[in-house]
Amino acid sequence: MELRNFTRRARVLRLSSLVAGLLALGVGHLAGAQDTPLLSGGVGFFSNTPGGNTSAYSILEPLAAVPVGPHLLIESRAALLETWSPNGQGGYDHSHFVGLTYLQGDYVASSHLTAVVGSYLLPFGTYNERLSPIWIGNFQDGPLVASLGLLSTGTGLGAQLRGNAISRAKYSIDYTTWYSARSANSQFSAERSFGGRSSLYLPGQRLEVGLSYDRSLQNTQENFYGMHVWWEPKETNFRLRSEFARGHHAQGYWVEADYRTAAFGGLDSFIGRFEPLFRMQQTFRRDTIISDGLPLLNTQRADFGLDYNLPHNVRILTSYTRQFSSTSNENIWETGIVYRFLFPAWRGK
Amino acid sequence: MTIRAKHLVPGLLVLAAVGVAVVSSRPGYTQSTPSSGSQPQVKQYQVPKGASAEDEGQRIFAQNCSRCHNAPEGFPPRISGTIARHMRVRANLSDHDEQVLLRFLNP
C-alpha cells in the first residue's frame, strides 16, 4: 500500500513538473501580447446507473497550451479520475487514476501544413479528437463504436502531418496522416500503426463528409475504415452528427441530433438554454473474435438526453438509455454537471 | 503486386506533402513589400467584397469552433492568439482562417 501511494505521488509529481516545465518554456519565448500560455479544461461530477447499479465519478481534465515563438505550440491534456462503484456487498469500491491523455508539439510549417510530434489523439472519425473532452460531449459516455479504429489506447506516439489542403468560399478539404510507434510506457502507450483522415466541408450546405482509415501493424494486423457526416442546417440551432466504423471483426454506427431554440428570447433565455438530444447506435459483430471494445453481441441503443447550459460555462447533462441485445435489455440513467474553465497561465500586463 | 506496409507509410507521407505543395495560392492574401530590408514581410488579409471582417470571423468561428462546442463566456485578450493557434491545429484551419479568427476573437 505504501509503495502504491509513493508510486502514485511520484506520478502526480512527474505530471505536475511536466506541465510546470511547459509553462516555464512559454514564459521564456512569448511571441506576442496575445500568445500567453493558457490553462483550460473541465471539471465534472457524474453518476450513471446501468441496470440499477449506480456508480459515480469525478473528473478533472486540465489542458495546457503553450505557444513557443511564432510557429510552435505545445499542448497537453491530462485526466484525474476518482471512481466509486458498487462492490456487490452493499458497499462501494473507490479507485483513482491519473494520466496524460496526450502531449504533443505542433509546428506550423506553412499555410497548409502543420507537423505534430509526440503523443497525440488518433484522428480516426470525429469523436476522439473533437467530442471526447468532458466539456464538449453532449452525452456523458461516448458512442459504443468509438473504440473501433482507436487501436486500444486512442493515442499514437510518433508524428502527424495535417492541415487545410484547399480552402475556398464554397468548399474546403482538410487532411491528416500519421504514423505511430509501439510504446508500452504507462503514460504514452500506443500501438505501431498508421492512418489518415480527410474531410470535405461545404459551407453553403453546412455539410461535412469525411473518410478515415488506419491499420494496426503489430500482432494481428487489421484495417479499420470510418466515415462521418455532420450537418447543421443553415439558420437553425439543429445539429446532426453521425459516424460509421468498420473493423475486421465488428462494425457499427451512431447518429446524434441536438437542438436549441432561440424562439423564446434567444439561446441565453431560460428556455433557450435547454438542449434536447437523441442518439441512435447499433453495433454488429462480424465474427466471434474479440479485438475491439464493442459488445460481444449485436446491440441496439437509443439515448434520450436533455442538457441545460447554465451561465458561466456550466452544463448539466442528463440522459436515459434503452439498450437492446439478444441476451438482455437494459436501462441506463446518467446525470452529471461540468464546469469548463479557461484562463491565462499567469497574470499579464 | 503487393505494397509492403513499410513502403506504404513513407509513401503516404510523401503523397500528403506533395499534395500540400501543389495546392495553389489562396485568394484573399497579398504579400506586402517590405519598406526596408530589415522589416519582415507581413501577410495582410483582404476581406472579400460584400463581407465585413466581423462577418468573416463569425463565419469561421461558427464553422470551425461552435460546431463542436459552446463558445466560452469571455476570456482575456492576451490568450486569444493561443486559442486561435490551438484551433488552427485542431480544426485544420488555413493561415487565412486563423488570422480572421484571431481578429474576431480580439478585434
Image: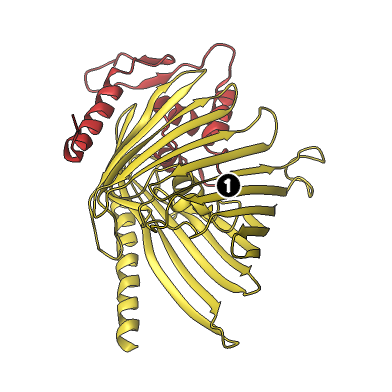
Q: Give amino acid for label 1.
A: Pro
Seen in the image, is A246 located left or right of residue A258? left
- Does residue A5 appear in the picture of this structure? yes
The residue drawn where x is 29% and y is 68% is A14
In the image, residue B51 above or below residue B102: above
Give the camera-side residue of A188 and A76.
A188
In the image, residue A181 above or below residue A54: above
Disc 1 crowd, CA 10 A, few/some/many (<14, 14-19, 20+): some
Q: Position of residue A229 (x, y in %)?
A: 54, 34
Seen in the image, is B96 located left or right of residue A320? left
The residue marked by circle 1 belongs to what chain?
A: B
Q: Position of residue A25 (x, y in %)?
A: 28, 53
The residue drawn where x is 43% and y is 55% is A63
Q: Quadrant of residue B13?
A: top left
The residue drawn where x is 46% and y is 16% is B46
Seen in the image, is A133 located left or right of residue A178? right
Quarter occupied by the N terminus of chain A: bottom left
In the image, residue A109 above or below residue A166: below
Q: Which residue is mark 1?
A: B72
In the image, residue B53 above or below residue A344: above
Instruction: Provide the secondary structure element on which disc 1 rests.
Output: loop
Give the camera-side residue of A313 and A271.
A271
Give the camera-side residue of A238 and A252.
A252
Picture colour for chain B: red
Q: Position of residue A287 (x, y in %)?
A: 42, 53
For the rendered model, the colour scheme is by chain
Give the chain coloured yellow.
Answer: A
Seen in the image, is A254 located left or right of residue A289? right
- Does residue A69 appear in the picture of this structure? no
Q: Quadrant of residue A173?
A: top left
Q: Position of residue A163 (x, y in %)?
A: 36, 32
